[in-house]
Every structure is written in structure tokens, then in C-alpha cells.
Image (cartoon, rainbow, N blue to C red):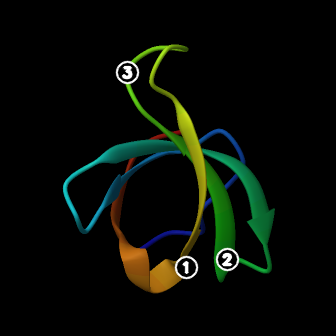
Amino acid sequence: MRKIKEFDRVLLKDGREADVMEVFENKAFIVDVGNSPEDWETISVTIEDIEKVLTK
């Protein structure tokens, strides 16, 4: 997997897509999940929670 950067879109292993908001040493991340402002949720994930990077 390539290095994950701020604002990348990633696929989480639980099937959800997330937008990366903050990166900590490419091991921990703050991401937003959800489809619209009404259901967005900001969560913390680790590199082990990410399946792959979808876009830059």
C-alpha cells in the first residue's frame, strides 16, 4: 500500500469509504465516514483498519 496522505479517500476493512483528515506518522489517522453532512462521523483508525487507497 502506498503512503496515505491527507484528503486521500480510503476503503476501510469494514467496507466503509472514508476521507482522511489527518495523518500521524502514516500509522494512525483521523477520517470522516458517511455520505453527507447529516451522517458524517469523524473517527480514528489505524493503518491496519485500511484496506486500500481509492483516490488521491
Q: Is residue 32 left or right of residue 11?
A: right
Earlier along the polypeptide chain: callout 3 or callout 1? 3
- Identify the mark at residue 28; answer none if there is no mark: 2
- Identify the mark at residue 46; answer none if there is no mark: 1
**In front: mark 2 or mark 3?**
3
On the image, which quarter does residue 19 sit in?
top right
Earlier along the polypeptide chain: callout 2 or callout 3? 2
In this rendering, the answer to whether 27 lies above or below 16 is below
Instruction: State the separation of the CA atoms marked 2 and 3.
Output: 22 Å
Which quadrant does the C terminus fall into?
top right
Instruction: State the separation of the CA atoms marked 3 and 1.
Output: 21 Å
Measured from the top left, where is residue 43 in percent x and y? Answer: 59, 56
The one of 7 and 18 positioned closer to us in this rendering: 18
Residue at (42, 85) in percent of width and height = 48
SS class of the residue under badge 1?
A: strand
Measured from the top left, where is residue 36 in percent x and y? Answer: 45, 14
Q: Amino acid at mark 1?
A: Thr
The one of 30 and 25 positioned closer to us in this rendering: 30
Earlier along the polypeptide chain: callout 2 or callout 1? 2
Instruction: State the separation of the CA atoms marked 2 and 1.
Output: 4 Å
Measured from the top left, where is residue 14 in percent x and y? Answer: 22, 64
Residue at (41, 31) in percent of width and height = 34
SS class of the residue under badge 2?
A: strand
Q: Which residue is mark 3?
A: 35
Question: Do the residues bearing badges 2 and 1 touch, measured as CB atoms within 8 Å?
Answer: yes
Q: Residues within 10 Å of mark 3 (few under 14, many from 20)?
A: few
On the image, which quarter does residue 45 sit in?
bottom right
Measured from the top left, where is residue 4 in percent x and y? Answer: 60, 62
Which quadrant does the N terminus fall into?
bottom left
Q: Amino acid at mark 2?
A: Ala
